[in-house]
């Protein structure tokens, strides 16, 4: 009797675990192939766009749909790595337009996951800022065209400086604030915010220590680790968001930030805060449109990309989200106060201080070092 009962219990457990496995597998398949299945049942002309948030507005999408009669389905990813991981599994089946960052374009191109773009079909291609074209990740722009870009810099409370007009340096982030007080650079000790991305933090530290963001040796990585461990004493938070709260609340005085988020801070307290590209230079990120290799709607994808590259929607997205336009004509629509706040938009001498992120760092090792920093 007991043996029969145990056998029955074991059978139920096996069935239960099998059911859980089936549900899990179904969830994975749904995540990977939902776009394909949706389009199988969709009889109308449509596009599926897989992108970061805050690149293309709903207003712009609705205007495109009205102009071309093409329905657009938007899906979002959080990181470039998430995009690549998904494409390595399903090769991008079901997607027609994606928005990878510069370094990710190179990786996806190497993986053979991108369709060539015919720039002759893009009526606004000739209006794009030449400084953003023919970059290392796609020298001939065969697989990508820029959609927006941003520069990293230092946002700070002008009241902290002894001389409010002086240029800022990376030392304000990496040198002990007490030493800067003794040097007469700042009025008092302070806290800072750093972004929470191991690759970008290590590259920034390399610019400070070695004036380079490429060719970093293992020995230099370990020296950077020690620098970051020392810096941790005056880091209030590692975050890419909510910096207006830290600044407005007098919690920090300096922060590393992407220019796309500075506009919001300036719109509330432009008289108090300033943004500068450090004297030693800083990082920049070019965001791009690309077409997956497996897309069956390449012509419609070109129409969508071209529509979003127009002066009108480049300007619209700058005011909506803060990312720098790629269409040069849009620069004429940006108020002078923003041109002065973001001089890299117009002035080559500032733009030349910006460095793109290359696929050179040993990411696994950097992640291990970053973990040691944050747990030290």
Image (cartoon, grey):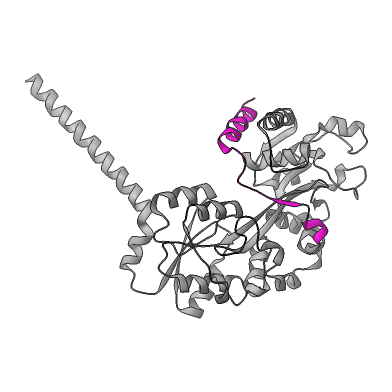
Quarter of the figure with residue 365: top right
* In-front residue for pair 353/56: 353
From this viewpoint, which residue is outermost toward the left? 1
Indicate whether residue 329 is drawn in magenta. Answer: no
- Which residue does the image show at 16% across and 28% down from the upper left? 9
The image shows residue 62 at horizontal and vertical percentages of: 51, 73
Asked if residue 289 can be seen in this view, the reply is yes
Q: Is residue 142 above or below residue 231?
A: below
Indicate whether residue 375 is drawn in magenta. Answer: yes
Q: Quadrant of the N terminus?
A: top left
Quarter of the figure with residue 225: top right
For the record, the magenta segment spans 348-376
* In-front residue for pair 242/344: 344
Q: Quadrant of the C terminus?
A: top right
The image shows residue 308 at horizontal and vertical percentages of: 58, 70
Asked if residue 197 can be seen in this view, the reply is no
The number of discs equals 0
In this rendering, would 307 be left or right of 335?
left
* In-front residue for pair 296/180: 296
The image shows residue 66 at horizontal and vertical percentages of: 49, 78
The image shows residue 341 at horizontal and vertical percentages of: 80, 58
């Amino acid at each position: 009797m007991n043996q029969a009962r145990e056998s029955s219990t074991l059978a139920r457990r096996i069935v239960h675990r099998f059911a859980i496995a089936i549900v899990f597998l179904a969830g994975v398949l749904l995540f990977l192939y939902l776009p394909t299945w949706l389009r199988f049942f969709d009889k109308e002309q449509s596009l599926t766009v897989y992108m970061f948030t805050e690149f293309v507005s709903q207003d712009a999408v609705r205007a495109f749909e009205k102009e071309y009669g093409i329905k657009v389905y938007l899906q979002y990813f959080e990181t470039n790595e998430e995009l690549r991981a998904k494409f390595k599994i399903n090769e991008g089946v079901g997607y027609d337009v994606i928005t990878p960052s510069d370094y990710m374009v190179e990786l996806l191109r190497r993986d053979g996951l991108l369709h060539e773009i015919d720039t002759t079909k893009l009526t606004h291609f000739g209006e794009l800022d030449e400084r953003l074209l023919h970059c290392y990740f796609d020298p001939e722009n065969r697989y990508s065209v820029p959609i927006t870009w941003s520069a990293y810099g230092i946002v700070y409370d002008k009241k902290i400086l002894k001389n409010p007009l002086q240029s800022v340096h990376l030392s304000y982030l990496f040198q002990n604030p007490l030493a800067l007080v003794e040097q007469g650079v700042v009025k008092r000790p302070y806290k800072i915010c750093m972004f929470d991305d191991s690759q970008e933090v290590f590259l920034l530290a390399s610019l400070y220590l070695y004036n380079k963001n490429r060719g970093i040796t293992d020995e230099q990585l370990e020296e950077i680790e020690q620098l970051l461990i020392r810096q941790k004493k005056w880091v209030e938070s590692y975050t890419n968001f909510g910096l207006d709260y830290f600044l407005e609340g007098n919690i920090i005085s300096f922060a590393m930030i992407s220019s796309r988020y500075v506009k919001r801070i300036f719109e509330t307290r432009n008289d108090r805060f300033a943004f500068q590209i450090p004297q030693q230079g800083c990082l920049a990120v070019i965001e791009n449109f690309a077409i997956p290799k497996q897309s069956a709607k390449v012509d419609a994808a070109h129409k969508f990309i071209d529509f979003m590259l127009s002066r009108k929607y480049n300007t619209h997205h700058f005011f909506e989200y803060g990312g720098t336009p790629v269409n040069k004509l849009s620069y004429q629509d940006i108020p002078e106060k923003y041109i002065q706040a973001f001089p890299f938009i117009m002035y080559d001498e500032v733009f030349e201080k910006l460095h793109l992120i290359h696929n050179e760092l040993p990411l696994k090792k950097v992640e291990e070092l970053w973990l040691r920093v944050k747990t030290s």
